[in-house]
Image (cartoon, rainbow, N blue to C red):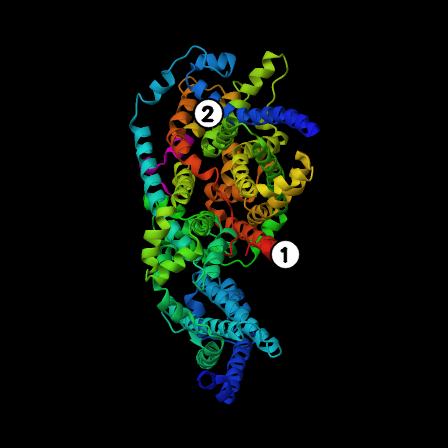
């Protein structure tokens, strides 16, 4: 019975011919769609150019730069040269979709060529999923292009734009490719005893329901705003308003590169490195110290007291720091006067501030990390220590050879989380302690304060602010992806994701 | 044996001293703030701060509550934001954490990564602001102040660690065999043993809301929706600016809120959250462990 069931349920034997035909169709569709994304394949054509340029109020010199047709990738240059910011956001999103579809097609094709030789665990399923994502993005790209053309024609009140053949061809090919891949995938799933997305929804629909609020939140708060990266490539002005300000390409980035970026990057990274290194060393030190204290009362009270600064808001920290370091009535200068020394003008001397900021960061955050490490230490089995004592290990040896090595996983996880935010400054800390005191910026300005300041004080630099934010985000992203990759290669247990 | 005992005793004393010093350093600023708030302003200017209030007086508190409308409004808003943000956020975080803790859920690692991804890449502050202010048009509403902080990715991961630790897989499996669905497992099995997790995550959530000034500064159009910290920030900021100018120009600083009033405000603004802390502390002192993104 078993044998019969396997023979019947194993489509790999019976349908191998269709199998192979479908897999080649899917791969060929992928390759074709990739070709159609190349810049020389033109998707968007201009109609009645003279009338159109008239509506756009273009000068002859600007018209000279324009041509009659554009690909998805070059359409942004049309937006820039013709100064039609209105079309910018839409074509930028198209570009993102095009990039995503290209990435998925390439990934899928890569798997297609490699997996020929070795099919592991899940067989070809990952390949199908990549190819299908690529197909869906291609379809979306065609639809989006048609949408853009519709929108533009509507905006200018004339049929100035027309979709080229590749738009429709791309849509048709992606549908065919998707269906072919879906057919193949179904057989493969039966073979591998894996179920697809719909089956998972049917089985665990209540879990999906649980995720709905979370999904809505991150969509609104994080994922949809990512489209706003577009503003990094624009030059905001009030006349054209937000969504129609001119597209300027990489001009904002060039400006940043020539002025602030080096100084902001080094400041942000140096501060974070000091916070991470000194913070972790002190946290581990005090966690071990507390774990070694026998007196329960001292143990508990000190834990409570060391955690307390974590509850202070940064606004109150500002009051505190101001009261200590202020020139006239500050605690410090009062003390200096009383011992007959000259006063120190902290709020006009940048060199003191890295120290002040670091000290107050540590003051506020030692308790938290310490508790995390302490929880790990509490979890270490006492058997280890007893065995070590029997072997005659003293307290230092026990710490050195048992506690510290067992803290390593916690340390690496905390380190990775911290590295994920290496380009993110402690905005509230810096902003509250330094505020808009320009004298101190040379040593205290980090990306977050820079972006906040230029957007709140100079609304016209919105593009510049977004560009700085994007650079910060990308840089940090690359750092954490690389670090995690390296750690995963060395020891997958320690990897963060 | 003898040698170890002796080094142990010496070590004990050093440990005690070090810990005491650190603990005192941590609470010192609190003491300075509280005693400063009970000192008269002239005393502070003349002699600086001290550990115990000299010439004990509560006049700073009197000044604050002489015209209490503004501060009471800020207090009310703060309680509102903290309550709604903590309650709603805690529910969503727990539901999400439950889902990504379930081994049989096929996409748990993908979902965790998508949640974590928001902490390492994003559009940045400006697109985020434009989303709420220009696209959703929420400037000036209270929704814009509490909504954006409902879920903190790190707290989701923390909560998942709590769930995995509190509910062994075998328990869930046997409940399933007995015919319980996820709904029932969540309410009847997971939630009842999740006390420490709820307390810890709830405290962090409440702390985040209580101490927030940033969203009020971004989305408020009138002082009616200001949170307490932003009210304090505004007060401090304006007087600080005036005082700095007074260094160079001749400005009468007599009418500005005094040092002791600012300190009293700080006490008033920190109070409630610090009162909450001891009740919750026993849960998380043993409980905060961090896990990786993947489950």
Quadrant in the picture for the C terminus of chain A: bottom right
Q: Quadrant of residue A31?
A: bottom right
First to last magenta residue range? B219-234
Q: Is residue A485 magenta?
A: no
Residue A334 seen by the camera = yes
The answer for how far apart the CA atoms under marks 1 and 2 are is: 57 Å
Residue A252 drawn above or below residue B110: above
Residue under label 2, please give it: B242
Chain letter for mark 1: A
Depth check, front residue: A444 or B292:
B292
Q: Position of residue A448 (x, y in %)?
A: 52, 44
Residue A260 seen by the camera = no
Assign the magenta stretch its main secondary structure.
helix
Residue under label 1, please give it: A491
Residue A413 drawn above or below residue B28: below
Q: Position of residue A113 (x, y in %)?
A: 60, 77
Q: Kindly identify the residue that appears in the image at 43 percent across and 57 percent down.
A: B170
Q: Quadrant of residue A182?
A: bottom left
Instruction: Tally the numbered discs.
Output: 2
Residue A412 drawn above or below residue B1: below
Chain letter for mark 2: B
Q: Secondary structure at mark 2?
A: helix
Depth check, front residue: B118 or A128:
A128
Q: Secondary structure at mark 1?
A: loop
């Amino acid at each position: 019975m078993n044998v019969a069931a396997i023979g019947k349920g194993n489509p790999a034997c019976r349908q191998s011919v269709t199998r192979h035909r479908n897999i080649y169709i899917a791969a060929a569709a992928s390759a074709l769609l990739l070709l159609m994304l190349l810049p020389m394949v033109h998707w968007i054509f201009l109609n009645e150019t003279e009338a159109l340029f008239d509506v756009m109020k273009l000068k002859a010199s600007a018209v000279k730069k324009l041509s009659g047709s554009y690909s998805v990738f070059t359409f942004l240059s049309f937006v820039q040269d013709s100064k039609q910011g209105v079309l910018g956001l839409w074509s930028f999103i198209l570009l993102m979709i095009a990039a995503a579809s290209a990435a998925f097609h390439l990934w899928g094709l890569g798997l297609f060529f490699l997996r020929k030789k070795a099919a592991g665990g899940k067989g070809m399923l990952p390949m199908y999923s990549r190819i299908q994502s690529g197909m869906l993005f291609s379809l979306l790209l065609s639809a989006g292009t048609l949408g853009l053309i519709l929108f533009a024609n509507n905006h200018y009140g004339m049929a100035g734009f027309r979709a080229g053949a590749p738009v429709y061809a791309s849509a048709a090919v992606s549908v065919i490719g998707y269906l072919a891949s879906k057919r193949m995938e179904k057989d493969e799933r039966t073979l591998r005893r894996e179920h697809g997305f719909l089956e998972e929804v049917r089985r665990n629909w209540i879990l999906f329901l649980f995720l709905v609020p979370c999904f809505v939140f991150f969509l609104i708060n994080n994922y949809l705003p990512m489209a706003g990266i577009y503003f990094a490539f624009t030059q905001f002005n009030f006349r054209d308003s937000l969504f129609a300000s001119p597209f300027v390409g990489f001009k904002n980035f060039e400006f940043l590169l020539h002025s602030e970026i080096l100084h902001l990057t080094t400041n942000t990274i140096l501060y974070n490195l000091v916070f991470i290194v000194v913070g972790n060393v002190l946290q581990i030190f005090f966690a071990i110290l507390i774990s070694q204290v026998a007196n329960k009362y001292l143990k508990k009270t000190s834990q409570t007291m060391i955690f307390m600064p974590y509850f202070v808001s940064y606004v109150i920290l500002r009051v505190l720091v101001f009261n200590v370091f202020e020139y006239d009535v500050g605690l410090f200068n009062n003390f200096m006067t009383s011992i007959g020394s000259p006063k120190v003008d902290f709020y006009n001397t940048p060199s003191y501030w890295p120290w002040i900021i670091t000290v107050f960061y540590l003051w506020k955050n030692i308790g938290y990390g310490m508790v995390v490490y302490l929880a790990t230490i509490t979890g270490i089995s006492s058997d280890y220590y007893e065995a070590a004592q029997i072997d005659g290990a003293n307290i230092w040896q026990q710490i050195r050879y048992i506690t510290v090595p067992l803290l390593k996983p916690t340390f690496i996880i905390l380190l990775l989380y911290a590295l994920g935010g290496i380009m993110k400054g402690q905005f509230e800390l810096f902003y509250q302690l330094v505020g808009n005191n320009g004298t101190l910026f040379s040593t205290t300005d980090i990306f977050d304060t820079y972006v906040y300041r230029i957007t709140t004080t100079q609304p016209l630099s919105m593009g510049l602010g977004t560009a700085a934010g994007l650079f910060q985000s990308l840089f940090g992203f690359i750092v954490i992806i690389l670090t995690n990759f390296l750690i995963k290669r060395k020891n997958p247990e320690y990897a963060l994701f | 044996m003898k040698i170890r005992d002796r080094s142990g005793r010496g070590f004990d004393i050093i440990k005690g001293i070090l810990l005491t010093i650190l603990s005192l350093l941590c609470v010192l600023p609190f003491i300075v703030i509280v005693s400063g708030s009970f000192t008269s302003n002239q005393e502070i200017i003349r002699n600086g701060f001290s550990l115990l209030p000299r010439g004990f007086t509560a006049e700073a508190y009197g000044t604050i509550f002489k015209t209490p409308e503004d501060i009471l409004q800020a207090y009310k808003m703060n309680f509102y934001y903290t309550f709604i943000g903590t309650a709603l956020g805690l529910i969503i975080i727990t539901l999400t954490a439950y889902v990504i803790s379930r081994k049989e859920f096929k996409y748990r690692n993908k979902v965790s990564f998508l949640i974590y991804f928001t902490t390492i890449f994003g559009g940045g502050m400006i697109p985020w602001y434009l989303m709420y202010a220009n696209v959703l048009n929420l400037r000036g509403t209270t929704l814009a102040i509490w909504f954006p902080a409902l879920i903190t990715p790190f707290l989701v991961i923390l909560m998942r660690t709590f769930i995995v630790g509190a509910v062994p897989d075998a328990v869930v499996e046997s409940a399933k065999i007995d015919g319980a669905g996820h709904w029932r497992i969540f309410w009847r099995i997971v939630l009842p043993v999740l006390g420490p997790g709820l307390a810890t995550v709830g405290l962090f959530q409440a702390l985040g809301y209580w101490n927030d000034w940033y969203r009020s500064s971004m989305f408020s159009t009138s002082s009616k929706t200001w949170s307490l910290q932003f009210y304090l920030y505004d007060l401090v900021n304006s007087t600080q600016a005036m005082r700095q100018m007074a260094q160079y120009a001749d400005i009468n600083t007599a009418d500005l809120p005094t040092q002791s009033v600012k300190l009293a405000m700080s006490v008033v603004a920190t109070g409630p959250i610090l009162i909450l802390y001891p009740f919750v502390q026993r849960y998380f002192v043993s409980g905060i462990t961090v896990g990786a993104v993947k489950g």
